[in-house]
Image: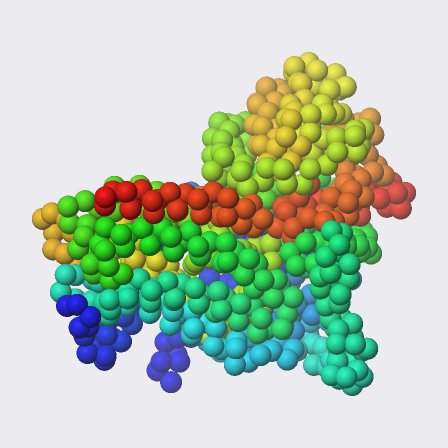
Amino acid sequence: MGVRATLARWAAAAPVPTFVVAGFGAREAAQDLWLDPRIVLVAAPRQASVLLLAGDVPEPLLQAAIRAHDVMPAPRAVVAWRTSHRAVTERFPTVAVAEGPQPAEALVAVHRALRTGDQTSTPPILADVDPAPWRGEGPYGQGGSGMTGGVPYGRPMATREDDRDGLTLDALPVPVGPLFAGFPDGLSARITFKGDLVHRFELQPNPFAADPQADRDDPFVRALADPVPIAELEVARARELLRACARTLHLQGLDALAVRAIALAGRAGPGEAAAVRRLGRWVTARWCTAVQLRRVGRIEPAALDGLGVGPVARAAGLAEDVRTDDPAYRHLGFTALTQQGNDAAARLAQRFDEAVQALELAGRADGLRAGGNGAVEGPRGRLTADGSPTARLLELVPELVTGREWGDATAALASLDLDLREAASRSADVAADPL
Amino acid sequence: MTGQGVHPMVAVTLIGGLLTVGVYIVAVLDATLRALVAGHPLQVGSVLTGPIRRAALLATTASGDTERPDAQGWALAPALLAGLAAVALATVPLTPQVSVADPSTGFVVFSAAIAFVMIAVFLHGWSPNSPWPLHGAYRYGAQALAFQIPFLLAMLATTLPAESLQIGEIVRAQEPLWNVVRQPLGLPLYLVVGVGVSFWGPLNLPDAADLAGGTTAESSGVGALLWQVARAAMLVAVAAMGAAAFLGGWWGPWLPAPVWMALKTLVLLAALVASRHLIARVRLERFVVICWVVLIPLALVNVFVAGAWLL
């Protein structure tokens, strides 16, 4: 008993392994949890003891969250923060609701209660049954014909299939997402792997489109209808760009540098331009990320031309920017920065350069306003009432990742900085809802 | 102490103690470097107690249970990796007088332990019966096949000046001049692939973030704890062997022999651990190509230069 109590006390003081499902309005707050030393965000639900539902989680993500919850090891708990209360409590019978601007306090409190025994572990929500019955067909009872090719328990087995280079390799179909940590939030796809290669990539519907929410707090969205101070727009842009850089760094295994970028995003202001430039130089150095990300995620510049995909296009040498046509920005002497690399390394460097530029613009904007004419240069590209850069980039995704190694495919996706919430909120259907 | 060794119980205690201390140091170094790179204030108390708290957390968490796992293999993998780390560390002489096991074939024993790491990692990825761990397991297969040859060639060059496969002799032969000077290519080659053997930082391909943790994606509880401990233990063994084979082991002025050995191991350990926070994950394909096209020829040049030195 003594040993167990001591262990429980130590465990209660450990950082809370948290698996986050971030809905609408929680993208930044979820990322900010990296800054809190009392929390550790884990990549797989199996490594978590608390499931955090943050923001308005749409139905398809809630369904995925239920499955994630059931594989979490005991003792486990669920915390909801700024969720639609009814939808969550219907599915998670014992959920702790976090109040306040940050969910961290509630996560720590629930974790402590779990470890000291003040709170019991949540029971499984789904029945523990096989996804499909065992069919017992075939010579080995694998549920299909031949040695391979069956779907025992509904799980597809690796099958032999001709490869693009004429070799016959095992092709393994795997559904990935929408809670896969290596993907942008909510992205889900049916992927056929051949070894480490993506043989086939079928994008699945955007889960956020099931229940799109207006994003009126976003300064770029407000700038579609009314002029907004340039200083506000540019600081918001710098923050978003730094957050995108942090996501790339995190995926490349550089968690500590990602934390540095997120912290800088949190306090970004005109005075931080030099700090952002220093971090950019460090991170994009050859030995740090540049060699690893070079030639990863290349897109034909012709495919990007006129697409309005912001830093991705400018990293390919296309000087496309809505701001160049804006008189207020022209007054500030704005010119679009470009790179020639057209790969994940160039996009990382481009985002750091643009973050520095944005903070410098914010510093001398001096009350100038921009926007109000229906098109805005957002942090990912040209934003309109019914069109988002994410939606346009998503169409390029299958071709971008097919035939690539998995590490390159995920790095390429991260380099596009997709925000599926934005794609859902800015789709033609939602735009009918007047701002 | 040629081939004499110590009493088996003493050996087990010594290796267990050294690995425990080493693993703890890895965790503390990692937390310290993470705080420095992240720009967090360094809280000494929490850095020192953090590893214990995290270990207690995992120890009191239930183990994973996937659909029809290979339970024995899953339990065996961390034990195998830790055992291999212990075997590898056992061949490293600690002082001129004390070595746990310094057989005349020490180099071969160490190499065998390193080669078997691939089995442990593959087993750890195969057993959960789940896509991401399996994916990580296959990745490590490709990675390990590519780096083991330059790793062993880099080590092999150190046996030439000693004219012996015994690690104790390799250290003794460095009294006039350390191998890091005599074979300047050796230590960098050894460290690059040493990171790969421990699948750490830039060469952590099997347990990478793009596989949601890879072979560890389905691990929790004691199994996950043991895997982390075993991986850190392998890092310690690699650093200790690097100190013995390239940095002159216990040789050094003023300080007693074991202190020199500990200091050199600590320096290498810090370098290995730091790579995780400073260098992004290397692409598998490029790493394999670099191993075959650059590192193996370099390692061969290193062997030839070491041989020419003796003539």
Q: Position of residue A295 (x, y in %)?
A: 63, 37
Which residue lies most toward the left here? B254
Q: Position of residue A190 (x, y in %)?
A: 77, 59
Quarter of the rendering containing residue A89: bottom right
Q: Which one is nearer the viewer's eye here, B87 or B266?
A: B87
Say whether residue A253 is left or right of residue A395: left
Say whether residue B196 is left or right of residue B108: right
Q: Position of residue A224 (x, y in %)?
A: 79, 32
Q: Residue, x 69% and y 70% (percent of image)?
A: A67
Say whether residue B150 is left or right of residue A386: left
Q: Residue, x 83% and y 38% (percent of image)?
A: A387
Q: Residue, x 29% and y 46% (percent of image)?
A: B307
Q: How many marks?
A: 0
Q: Which one is nearer the viewer's eye here, A103 or A272?
A: A272
**In the rendered image, the vertical position of residue A303 relative to residue A74, given as above or below:** above
Quarter of the rendering containing residue A71: bottom right
Is the C terminus of chain A in the top left, top right, bottom left or bottom right quadrant?
top right
Q: Which one is nearer the viewer's eye here, A368 or A374?
A: A374
- Can you see residue A300? yes
Is the N terminus of chain A in the top left, top right, bottom left or bottom right quadrant?
bottom left
**In the rendered image, the vertical position of residue B296 relative to residue A336, given as above or below:** below
Q: How is the image coloured?
A: rainbow
- Can you see residue A262? no
Q: Position of residue B51 (x, y in %)?
A: 38, 63
Q: Residue, x 48% and y 39% (percent of image)?
A: A288
**In the rendered image, the vertical position of residue A334 relative to residue A99, given as above or below:** above
